[in-house]
Image: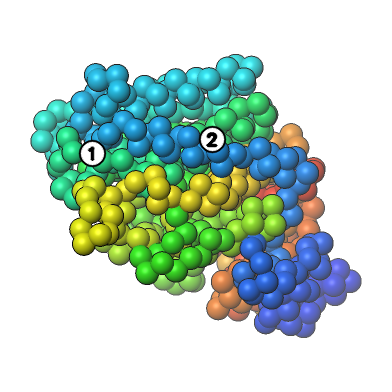
Amino acid sequence: MSHQRSHATSGTTRRAVLTAAAGAVTAGAAATGQATAAVPGQGPGRGHGSRPATAQSPSRELRALLKEIDPGRIEATVRKLASFGTRHTLSVQDDPVRGIGAARDWIFAEMQKYAEASGGRMTVELQSYIQEPASRIPVATRITNVVATLRGSVSPERVYVVSGHYDSRVTDVMDATSDSPGADDDASGVAVSMELARVMATRRPAATIVFAAVAGEEQGLYGATHMAAQYKAAGTDVQGMFTDDIVGSPKADDGALDPYTIRLFAEGVPSSETPEQAATRRSVGGENDSPSRQLARFVRDTADNDATGMNVRVIYRRDRYLRGGDHIPFLERGYPAARFTEPAEDFAHQHQDVRVEDGKQFGDLPEFCDFDYIARVTRVNGAALWTLAQAPGTPKNARIVTSNLTNSTELVWDRGTEPYLAGYEVVWRETTAPEWTRAIEVGDVTRHEVDLSKDNVFFGVRAVSRNGAKSPVAFPVPQR
C-alpha cells in the first residue's frame, strides 16, 4: 500500500488549502487544468458561474456522439408511442395497434434494430413478471420492461442504467380504456433512452450501459421495482441510474420558457441508510454527500457545457412534492440514482383526460412537446453516461483514518481493477459549499495525507483513467 503526504513543497500547505477551500474556485480549476465558465446568464451550459474544480471537458469522441442525436427521430418516437391510443398498464396486451402490448412490441422491435448494428454487443430482452393484485392493480397483470444491454468491452461487470416509462394514464389512474397519449409523461423519457441506445449501439463503452423502457410506473413503480430487484438479487454493480420522466417541454403552465435548463433530483440522506450509517452521518456530516449527490455533481461536471447546450439544475430532493419516479426502487436498494424532469411543468398536459374546456386543450398530446428540447436533454444524459462508462469506477471503500487526533487528514481507498486506471485525485470543499473547489493529483496510490484538518472541510476521492476521464467522487467515512 503506497503512502503520500502533501507538504509545503507540493504546494498544499495548510495556509494554501485553507485559502482555496474558502472560495478560490478558480485556483482549484487551474490546479486541474479546468477553465472557469462565464458569468450566469451568458448562454446555455453556463448558468452557474465558475465551474467546479471537478468539471470535465467533453472529449472529441463524446462531441461526435452527441452530434448524432436526432430531434427528428425523437419526435417520431414520441408520436409513434402516442399513436397507440392508451398505454395504460391495465390496457389490452394482445391488440397489434392499441394498448400497452402494442407499444411494448414496437419498442422491442426498434431496440432489436439498434442491436443489429452492435456486432453482438447489445442484447434486448422482454423482462416480464406477473404482478399479483396490489395497489392500483386490481387483477393479476403481466408487467413487462424492455431492456437493451450494451455490454462493456473492458469492465462489463460495472453497470449504468437510463430509463423512461412507457405506460401512461389519464385523470382516473384506473381508467385503462380512454385515450391516454402520454407524450410528455413519459414518451419523452422513453425517446431519450431509445435514442441513446441507437447512437451508442455502434460504439464500445468500457463499462456496460442499459437502456430501458419500463412499465407500471403510474400504478406504483412496479416495472422499475422489478428491474432493480433483479439487479440486486444478481449482485449487479449498478454504479449509476437515471430516470427521464417528463422531459418533453421547457414551457411552464403560465407560458414561461426555460429551454436550456433540465432539473436533476438527487436525494441527500440515502433511502437505504442503515441505523449505523445514520449515526455516522449525524456525527461527521455528509447529508449533502450521498452517492446520488455525487452522481448529480458528476452530471454537472460532464454535461453542463457547450456540447449539450444545457444548464443542469440539481435539486436537493429525492423528487417533487407528492410525486415519485423510477429511480426510487434503485435508491431503496442502495444504488446511486437520480431523476431528470423538465424545468417547470404544465399540469394541463399531465394525467389529464384529452378534452377542450373553455377553449383550452387538456391532455398529454405530442403538440405540446418540444423535440429540440428533448434532444438537448438526451445529450445531457448521453454526456454523463458515456463519461461514466469510459472512466474508471467510483473508488470503493474510501475511508478517513481517525485512529489518531491530528490536524492533518489521511485518506485510504481500494485500488480499482480497470487496466486503463492511471491514478487518483483527492478533492475537497468547505462544508457549506455545494461543489468541490479543490482537486489534486495524488498518483496511483491507495493512501494520501493532506495537511488540512478533516474537521473543517469535506474530502472525496475520484479515479482517473489514462485518457483523463474521471469517475464520480467517493465520499469517505471514518476508519477507526
Residue 40 image-quadrant placement: bottom right
Q: Which residue is mark 1?
A: 179
Compared with residue 276, is residue 100 higher up or lower down, i.e. above or below? above
Q: How many C-alpha atoms fall within 10 Å of the one at disc 2: few (<14), some, or many (≥20)?
A: some
Q: CA distance from mark 2 to mark 1?
A: 23 Å
**Residue 327 rendering spot, x and y as whole percentages:** 39, 48
**Furthest-front residue in this view:** 359
- Classify residue 113 as left or right of residue 33: left
Q: Earlier in the sequence, mark 2 or mark 1?
A: 2
Question: Residue 122's x, y, as percent?
Answer: 56, 23
Residue name at image x 36 percent, y 55 percent = 271
- SS at mark 2 in the image: helix
What residue lies at 76% left-to-right and 46% top-to-bottom? 59
Q: Nearer the viewer, residue 118 or 288?
A: 118
Image x and y of residue 137, in percent = 15, 37
Q: Which residue is mark 2?
A: 73
- Residue 86 marker: none
